[in-house]
Image (cartoon, helix red, strand yellow):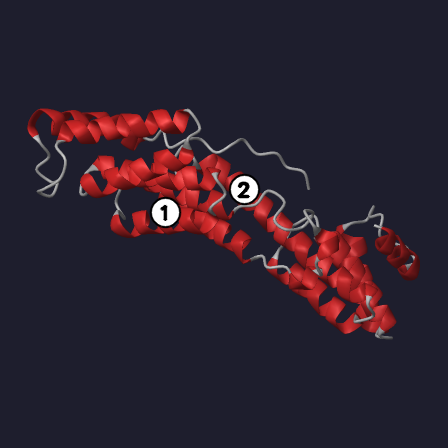
Amino acid sequence: MTTMFKPCPTPALRLASLVLGVALACQLGGCASAPKNVDDGKSIAKLYEEAREESANGAYDRAIKLYERIEGRAAGTLLSQQAQLEQAYLLYKQQEKARALAVVERFLKLHPTSPAGDYAYYLQGLINFNDDLGLFGSIARQDLSERDQQASRDAYQSFKQLVDRFPESKYAPDAKVRMKYIVNALASYEVHVARYYYMRGAYLAAANRAQQALQDFRGVPAAEEALFLMAASYDKLDLAPLRDDAQRVLKTNYPRSEWIGRDYDEKARWWRLW
């Protein structure tokens, strides 16, 4: 699976169009919603512009610190919300996943009705989303049965909340594509684990894992190999009726499948080479 995705957009949101107005209002007359004993609006606006410049120049650490200051000093304003999202995005760019997620989660908790809620869910999904989803990166160095796919599931849930709550969002189409990709990748992962068990002679575990993949992920490309694995595993277990059932379903749903009629042990040798 080599799906290519467009890069994450920067936090240039509907919220951003309001930020300059907020900063200007603070500069001219002060923010009524801002707490007392903080820098005046002019200094906050300058901090924001400085943070944007540092970010544009690739000085992410300095920009993040500035956004943190803005978040506190402009608390209760749209500018503070924007600063939070800018922080999260830059932390994501620096691959500081835990910190980025913490900022997004704080944003969603503090601002559940924010006009930038769609972007927050989208960014939360991207932070957890890994383009190879743990399947092809360093597969030879770790047993498939030990790999954690929770981040991929978390990404799916974030994208789903975006699509469900903000169906008209400009981020919704890309989120739908990523959701489909995650489902296919998770199904492939389950089949990889089933294959792992089969190659090590754990045929019952292989059959159960392949069957679980078919139950949890319907209509995915990996279903074809899952059926083959079930038939192969049942054959090794001398469970002819179950083997025949799996073969029948494979032939019915994939009449031109390359897996039909393959010798189980020959295919297993190919797996080992792969």
- Along the viewing direction, whichever of 243 and 11 lies nearer the viewer: 11
Please name whichever residue, 120 or 243, is drawn nearer the observer in this view of the structure: 120
Give the labeled residue for mark 1: 104
The amino acid type of the residue labelled 1 equals Val
Query: Position of 168 compared to 183: left or right?
Result: left
Dot 2 or dot 1: first in sequence order is: 1
Q: Nearer the viewer, residue 195 or 103?
A: 103
Badge 1 crowding class, 10 Å Cα cut-off, few under 14, some 14 to 19, many 20 or more, is many
Residue 87 picture quarter: top left
Q: Is residue 168 visible?
A: no
* x then y, percent, for residue 216: 60, 60
Q: Is residue 139 left or right of residue 270?
A: left
Residue at image coords 65%, 54%: 187
Badge 1 marks a residue whose secondary structure is: helix
User: Looking at numbered disc 2 in the image, what kind of residue is underneath it?
Assistant: Arg
Q: Residue at x 40, y 25 (%)?
A: 56
Residue at the disc numbered 2: 178
Where 198 falls versus 123 (above or below)?
below
Closer to us: mark 2 or mark 1?
1
Q: CA distance from mark 2 to mark 1?
A: 19 Å
Rendered-image quadrant of the N terminus: top right
Q: Residue at x 25, y 30 (%)?
A: 47
